[in-house]
């Protein structure tokens, strides 16, 4: 190609050297959110939760939040593997019970099946998690000792099972 067919540009001015404006036309891009990305974050939140759990405290809202975040991201990774659309994921929000129910409707049980006890603890945690009670200091809950608090060791077992089991399916879906 000769230099005449492709005018040189002066990018600092936004015009070609011939004085003609440079026009950039963006094209739409569709990006599929990766289940592997969600799984990676779920793994990191789980590691952080394990680091925060203190044996001398009966309950840590911070550890509970981190475990719940791991569970949420793992369930969303599973839903993404099954091509659940982003608007539906958004409508499920941070509601662990709804996310778990939706995942179970897509046969989560074929990979990992939370016990009745684990599901009860997810429900107990959801009471605090979906309302951001764990994220922001709530005086009433702190004073009453989080009366309906979940058992962290059970939540950790749920998050661990999800992270361990969903690693390969998330990798395969990428």
Image (cartoon, rainbow, N blue to C red):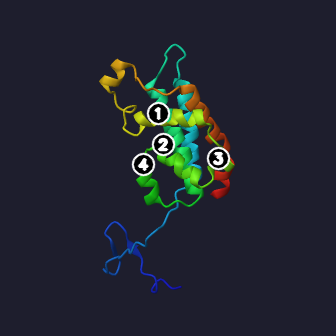
Q: Disc 1 and disc 4: Cα gap in Å?
A: 15 Å
Q: Which is nearer the N-term, disc 3 or disc 1?
A: 1
The residue mark sitting in front, 2 or 3, is 2
The residue mark sitting in front, 3 or 1, is 1
Q: Which residue is mark 3?
A: 166
Mark 3 element type: helix
Q: Is 84 left or right of 13, judged from the image as shown?
A: right
Q: Disc 2 and disc 1: Cα gap in Å?
A: 8 Å
Please name the residue shown 36% across and 21% down the image: 142
Q: Quadrant of the C terminus?
A: bottom right
Mark 1 element type: helix
Q: Residues within 10 Å of mark 2 (few under 14, many from 20)?
A: many
Q: Which is nearer the N-term, disc 1 or disc 4?
A: 4
Q: Which is nearer the N-term, disc 2 or disc 1?
A: 2
Mark 4 element type: loop
Label annotation for residue 125? 1
Q: Which residue is mark 2?
A: 96
User: Is 93 placed above or below 144 here?
Assistant: below
- As rendered, which of 1 and 82 lies closer to the eye? 82
- As rendered, which of 105 and 76 lies closer to the eye? 105
Label annotation for residue 93? 4
């Amino acid at each position: 190609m000769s230099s005449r067919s492709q005018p040189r540009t002066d990018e600092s001015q936004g015009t070609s050297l011939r004085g003609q404006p440079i026009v950039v036309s963006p094209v739409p891009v569709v990006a599929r959110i990766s289940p592997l990305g969600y799984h990676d974050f779920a793994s990191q939140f789980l590691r952080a939760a394990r680091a925060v759990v203190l044996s001398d405290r009966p309950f840590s809202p911070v550890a509970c939040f981190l475990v719940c975040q791991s569970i949420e991201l793992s369930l969303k990774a599973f839903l993404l593997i099954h091509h659940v659309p982003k608007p539906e994921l958004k409508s499920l929000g941070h509601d662990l019970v709804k996310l778990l129910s939706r995942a179970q409707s897509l046969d989560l049980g074929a990979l990992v099946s939370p016990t009745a006890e684990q599901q009860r603890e997810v429900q107990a945690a959801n009471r605090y998690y979906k309302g951001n009670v764990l994220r922001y200091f709530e005086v009433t809950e702190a004073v009453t000792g989080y009366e309906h608090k979940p058992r962290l060791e059970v939540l950790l077992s749920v998050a661990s099972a999800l992270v361990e089991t969903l690693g390969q399916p998330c990798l395969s879906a990428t």
